[in-house]
């Protein structure tokens, strides 16, 4: 955990005037266009920190040419310090102007209310996350718009994209990317693979954030930031190649707590229709269709096999290429 405190200390040194909000601000003074980079909205997904701190160092040393503004926030350092996803409630469900009554006084309810005015300043967000389990590759997952998809293609980090366009007009919970997307702005989330500090996470995060800044700087220099059409065609001309696009075709409700997946499944693992996915001597779970697994869940259990945490809503999803 010393490593973590060193990152927080360094971050606070560069943003001392911001108090405990964990906000770093850069202003290139040639444009008000604001990129928002977000890390550790889930406390134990710390893998973006080396990238964000190295970026801040380079911005402070003048090693990066950028005429616009950059806001960098660390979402939930208190949960990181406890090596938890969250303390009271999942922060990435609470980016709502009208928060559910029961969450208003929670740690995360307050954090979301501190972060939303900063998100309101942004013209674009890139939110960096990690998955609980390993992933065959990093992946983007965010509401689908032509410009957001073109940006993801243009900046790299991975070649996989999962369409997570919300279907409800009045959501009862909302992620940071969705909050920004509802303001009509590009909103990208990049999952950097399994949670924790590791080089592949640093590499994917570094490639995407550095290329994003370079891409927006190119658009600024071409006076394209005010014109969505020019912006889109310029970004597409810089594309690093097609993203493989996936959509969720099945969400398996967790159901009874004695249901268990066989050990060892990871994100993006291929499954075939009819394949048995359950652990031995537990209720049979069969893949209802072919595709790839997403977010397979293994809730922690006590010595009697009883789940000793809040049961997840879903035990797994299946995604397929579009
Ligand atoms: Zn996350």
Image: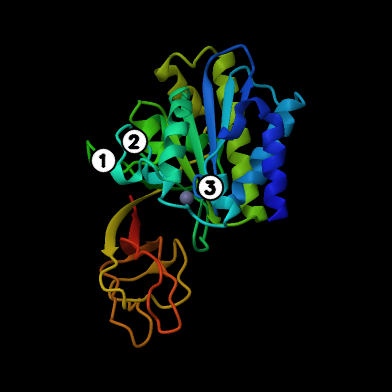
Q: Residue at x 24, y 42 (%)?
A: 167
Q: CA distance from mark 2 to mark 1?
A: 9 Å
Mark 2 — residue? 96
Q: Earlier in the sequence, mark 1 or mark 3?
A: 3
Residue 51: x and y in percent read 66, 42
SS of the residue under disc 2: loop
224 vs 56, nearest the viewer: 56
Q: How many marks?
A: 3
Residue 63 visible? The answer is: no
Write the residue at 36% across / 64% down.
310
The residue at which mark 1 appears reads as 171
Spatial CA span between label 1 and label 3: 29 Å
Q: Are marks 2 and 1 in contact (CB under 8 Å)?
A: yes
Q: Is residue 251 left or right of residue 185?
A: left
Looking at the rendered structure, which numbered label has been put on residue 250?
Answer: none
Q: Residues within 10 Å of mark 2 (few under 14, many from 20)?
A: many
Against 243, residue 308 (above or below) is below
Q: Which numbered marker is on residue 158?
A: 3
In this view of the protein, which residue sits in the foreground, 278 or 23? 23
> Which residue lies at the image location 37% right of the left edge and 86% below the top edge?
280
Q: Is residue 157 left or right of residue 285?
A: right
Q: Is mark 1 within 8 Å of ligand 1?
A: no
Question: For mark 1, does the 10 Å Cα neighbourhood hold few (<14), some (14 to 19), or many (20 or more) residues?
Answer: few
């Amino acid at each position: 955990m010393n490593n973590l405190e060193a990152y927080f200390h360094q971050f606070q040194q560069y943003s001392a005037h911001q108090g405990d909000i964990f906000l770093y601000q850069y202003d290139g003074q040639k444009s008000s266009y604001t990129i928002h980079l977000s890390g550790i909205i889930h406390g134990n997904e710390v893998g973006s920190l080396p990238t964000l701190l190295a970026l801040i160092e380079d911005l402070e040393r003048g090693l990066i040419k950028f005429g616009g503004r950059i806001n960098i926030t660390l979402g939930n350092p208190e949960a990181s310090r406890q090596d938890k996803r969250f303390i009271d409630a999942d922060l990435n469900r609470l980016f709502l102007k009208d928060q559910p009554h029961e969450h208003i006084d929670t740690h995360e309810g307050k954090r979301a209310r501190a972060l939303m005015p900063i998100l309101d300043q942004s013209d674009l967000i890139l939110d960096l996350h990690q998955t609980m389990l390993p992933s065959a590759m990093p992946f983007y997952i965010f509401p689908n718009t032509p410009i957001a998809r073109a940006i993801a293609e243009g900046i790299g980090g991975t070649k996989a994209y999962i369409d997570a366009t919300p279907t409800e007009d009045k959501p009862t919970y909302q992620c940071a990317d969705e909050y920004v997307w509802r303001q009509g702005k590009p909103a990208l989330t990049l999952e950097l693979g399994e949670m924790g500090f590791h080089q592949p996470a640093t590499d994917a995060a570094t490639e995407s954030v550095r290329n994003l800044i370079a891409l927006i700087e190119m658009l600024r220099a071409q006076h394209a930031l005010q014109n969505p059409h020019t912006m889109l065609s310029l970004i597409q001309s810089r594309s690093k190649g097609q993203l493989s696009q996936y959509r969720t075709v099945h969400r398996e409700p967790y159901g009874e707590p004695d249901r268990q997946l066989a050990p060892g499944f990871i994100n993006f693992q291929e499954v075939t229709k009819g394949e048995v996915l359950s652990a031995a001597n537990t209720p049979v779970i069969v893949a209802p269709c072919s595709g790839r697994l997403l977010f397979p869940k293994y809730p922690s259990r006590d010595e009697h096999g009883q789940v000793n945490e809040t049961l997840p809503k879903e035990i797994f999803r299946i995604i397929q290429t579009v």
